[in-house]
Amino acid sequence: LSGSGKSTLVRMLNRLIEPTAGEILLDGEDVTGMNAEALRNMRRTKMSMVFQRFALFPHRTVQQNVGYGLEIQGMDKNERADKVQKSLELVGLGDYADSYPDQLSGGMQQRVGLARALANDPDIIIADEPTTALDVTVQARSLDLLQTLRRERGLAPLLITHDFGVVAQVCDRVAVMKNGAIVEQGETHAVLRDPDVFGHRLDVP
């Protein structure tokens, strides 16, 4: 449900919100113990995030938005442009590099956010409600893209969603939150079919 703590929890994984207890292990290293430099490097190379509200710069073109993180890293302009274009092609926005966010639909803006996250070639991508602004066709294409990236690049998507169809299609494991706590977790189909979680058995494929 809304307000159960999902967004807060995932923002602790990359320490956009500082955890007050516990460990976050990534490749055996505790993220909570990283100094500022190590944390920046982790965010740049291992873990990217797609925000629910897109967080695009209105005064920058699509190309400039997608390449912003690479620009901050000091990447060569030509290399940056190549990575940006490849990311835009992946999300179906290759022809919109010179457009501005306000010239795009909400779904297209969401895909710009996804392209920006993919530009760093991360190991993990955190997506907060990644399909809420997408129509059915574009949503299916986006989910297919995530599946392809999992298979071909080993990308691990971590999704926040209210849509059980998205969970059933994309996720191997699911955690259900209520009032700031994880109340159930396990393999997706087992959890979604557990009547103790939702009060009834969900009809999932």
Image: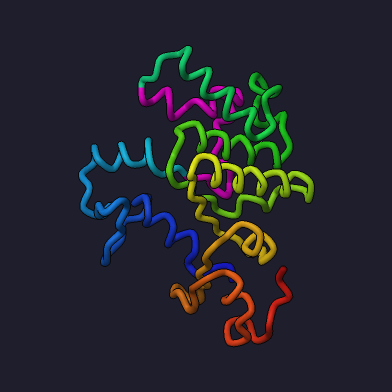
> At x 43% / y 26%, what residue is drawn?
70
Q: Quadrant of residue 85?
A: top right
Q: Front-most of 188 and 98?
A: 188
Q: In what quadrant of the picture does the C terminus appear?
A: bottom right
Horizontally, residue 180 falls left or right of residue 169, namely left
Find the residue positioned furthest to the front.
Answer: 152
Q: Front-most of 27 and 166?
A: 27
Horizontally, residue 35 falls left or right of residue 107, namely left
> At x 53% / y 34%, what residue is drawn?
116
Q: In what quadrant of the picture does the N terminus appear?
A: bottom right
Horizontally, residue 83 falls left or right of residue 90, namely left
Q: Front-most of 101 and 146?
A: 146
Count of marks overlaid on the render: 0
Q: Quadrant of residue 45?
A: top left
> At x 60% / y 54%, what residue is drawn?
129
Identify the magenta region. Answer: 49-73
> At x 67% / y 46%, what residue is drawn?
144
* Residue 79: % across, % down: 46, 16
* Residue 140: % across, % down: 73, 49
Q: Front-most of 111 and 104?
A: 111
Is residue 173 part of the magenta span, yes or no?
A: no
Is residue 62 part of the magenta span, yes or no?
A: yes
